[in-house]
DNA sequence: TTGTACGCGTTATCAG
DNA sequence: CTGATAACGCGTACAA
């Protein structure tokens, strides 16, 4: 564990200047005689030379690094997003620094600060805070930002959103098309814009069809915890079933909650979809494994990550690329948890 | 988007030397008159000064960064590990660079190279390659390494393993204690040491009890894909049920596969646990939501991440800390997928 | 084609 | 207490 070799060491060994070594080892394309080139490369290899990017990046003012801030990597949605981001980053020889904000604005702020200090030039963020000042700061420093999932209303920031409203609308219309008229909606607390949007889509679809909406919202705060969400689904289903004229279809704000709905129904000897149909929202793999496989709205998480990273890299490269936002469109995954019904017979 | 402020800029504005500015702004504790100190801090704040860590780290030869290389962040096991690593890193003001090797040795190698170039001084890795040369290289450069999950046989590398063998043994003994004598084991292809160990534990327990082992191994390669593993579980269950005298209990090498087992059983009108008991392995949250909740062996993923990061930081700090490996112990999560049976009546 | 010399932003050493 | 100056490792005008 001696001191690492530098270009100067190699220069001495090869009896050339460090400039020449730099030119060869950084593949700059700068003309160097074949003989020298080979000698330097050989010596570098023999001495296990590892370039120190700190020096290079300080000089070049470009760390090949992008930052990612998400609420929590243990949430399958975000880990898919992260996976997509990293894939594109890797293809472009970038590396990613990932941070979990844990939905804590203070922590998010601290991480943004760290990113700036580390000279990151691009940031993908699902922001929980609405601290405009901080974001403005980023812009002043020439740091490009792509906001995913959670919108940041600010000029010069690129948005990649998911069309939650349309997803909610689509799901509800599908249930209606299958003949359902009493459609219940169960949701986590609507403290986040995305939750509100899904519900908004549901409400609009019900209104368009001239139907009465039935919404049950959780009392407790949303935790990124599968078991908790599942239980919420069960609980809200109980409430729905207590209605005088309970719904024939239940639409849940995410798949995990839909699993809870199905669980509660089956515990109470309701058959899905024969007695009650269930619609999810997310499109996680597990939905395929349920009894019956869950019909749901697919949220393109992995694709969202890839696209976010691509756009970010574009923004970092081009000087004045025309920026535009993206609204990822929902897709219905038709499986087997919804049955055709005849409203006349209800 | 002007040039970022440096300590020199601030020095000029405050009419002091940059040395003094550095002393104040880096909280070095070096004595500076109160008056000057406050003036410098005020000016720094007003000009939105952000320290450039590249300069600092180049000088100090210490990036506060650790690298993590795992097969895939979309695997819930590894995302929990990652979460644990990051938590400890954050508490110590470290930042983590995460990379997915995708089980590709070449990619893993490339990422290790990148880590070295980025002057990372510590690395947590679940290595897929057996390239000793590379690892040796890390050691020569004074980079501390903690190997998780997948063992790296090499002096000076700290191991945090999970006792798969004991887990397999424990699970099997539990089934035996519940009166089961015909216990089947279904497993993914045993191409990885961990898979072999679990099976080894099972075999040993069966031998100790003087029972005949019944192992069904998948033909196809293991993919980190929930649906695929689930299907494998179903498929292997079919094979098990085709035996002349099928088992009364099935032990699966992971929870997802156990879900597949339960699914196949219920499709064939076998009741769990009345007709057949099922034991999982992993302890993922979802197991609680099954019908019935899955009894399983808990693999402390999150804790593994935390411990790995702690040990790494210790190694990076202390000069010659006595190093020791850790074997995380399995724990049985007793839920409801296993019933007490009476071997006499079988 | 090669070498010299400087600067990227920071901290540390040594005088004053 | 404060300031000048030399590193850290690298790339690149500019000169030769």
Image (cartoon, coloured by chain):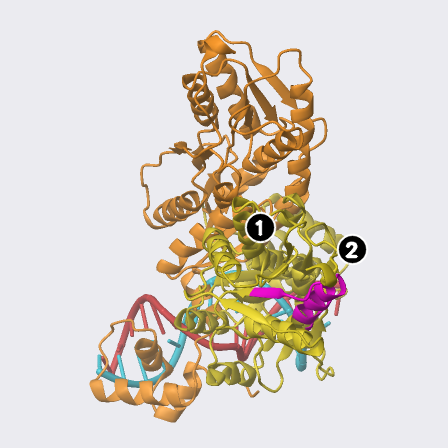
Chain colours: A yellow, B orange, C red, D cyan
Estimate the x, y position of residue B91 in percent, counting from the top left.
Answer: 35, 59
> What residue is rendered at 46% in x and 76% in y?
A129
| Occupied quadrant, residue B40 | bottom left
Estimate the x, y position of residue B344 in percent, counting from the top left.
Answer: 46, 8
Is any atom of residue A63 visible in this view? yes
Estimate the x, y position of residue A66 in percent, counting from the top left.
Answer: 59, 66
Is any atom of residue A9 visible in this view? no
Q: Which class describes the residues within 10 Å of circle 1: few (<14), some (14-19), or many (20+)?
A: many
B299 sits left or right of B101 in the view? left
B64 sits left or right of A159 in the view? left
Magenta residues (range)? A166-185
**Residue topped by disc 1:** A262
- The kind of secondary structure element at disc 1 is helix
User: Most prominent secondary structure in the magenta stretch?
Assistant: helix
B16 sits left or right of D12 in the view? left
Which one is in front, A303 or B161? A303
The chain to which mark 2 is attached is: A
Would you say residue B85 sits in the magenta stretch?
no
On whether disc 1 and disc 2 are found on a single subunit, the reply is yes
């Amino acid at each position: 564990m001696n001191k690492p070799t530098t270009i100067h060491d190699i220069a001495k060994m090869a009896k050339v200047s460090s400039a020449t070594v730099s030119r060869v080892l950084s593949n700059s394309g700068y003309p160097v005689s074949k003989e020298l080139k080979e000698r330097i490369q050989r010596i570098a290899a023999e001495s296990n030379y590892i370039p120190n990017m700190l020096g290079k990046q300080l000089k070049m003012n470009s760390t090949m690094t992008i930052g990612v801030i998400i609420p929590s990597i243990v949430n399958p949605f975000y880990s898919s997003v992260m996976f997509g981001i990293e894939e594109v980053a890797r293809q472009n020889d970038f590396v990613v620094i990932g941070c979990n904000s844990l939905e804590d604005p203070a922590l998010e702020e601290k991480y943004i600060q760290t990113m700036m200090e580390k000279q990151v030039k691009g940031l993908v963020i699902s922001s929980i805070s609405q601290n405009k000042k901080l974001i403005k700061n980023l812009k002043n420093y020439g740091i490009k930002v792509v906001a995913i999932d959670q919108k940041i209303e600010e000029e010069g920031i690129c948005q990649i959103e998911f069309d939650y409203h349309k997803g909610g609308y689509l799901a509800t219309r599908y249930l209606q098309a299958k003949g359902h008229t009493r459609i219940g909606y169960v949701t986590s607390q609507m403290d986040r814009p995305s939750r509100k949007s899904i519900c908004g889509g549901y409400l609009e679809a019900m209104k368009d069809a001239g139907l009465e909406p039935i919404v049950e919202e959780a009392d407790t705060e949303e935790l990124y915890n599968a078991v908790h969400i599942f239980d919420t689904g069960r609980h809200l289903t109980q409430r729905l079933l207590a209605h005088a004229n309970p719904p024939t279809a239940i639409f849940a704000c995410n798949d995990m909650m839909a699993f809870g709905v199905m669980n509660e129904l089956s515990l109470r000897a309701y058959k899905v979809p024969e007695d009650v149909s269930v619609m999810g929202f997310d499109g996680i793999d597990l939905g395929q494994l349920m009894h019956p496989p869950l019909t749901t709205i697919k949220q393109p998480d992995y694709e969202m990550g890839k696209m976010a990273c691509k756009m970010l890299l574009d923004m970092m490269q081009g000087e004045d690329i025309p920026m535009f936002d993206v609204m990822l469109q929902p897709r219905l995954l038709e499986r087997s948890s919804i049955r055709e019904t005849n409203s006349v017979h209800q």
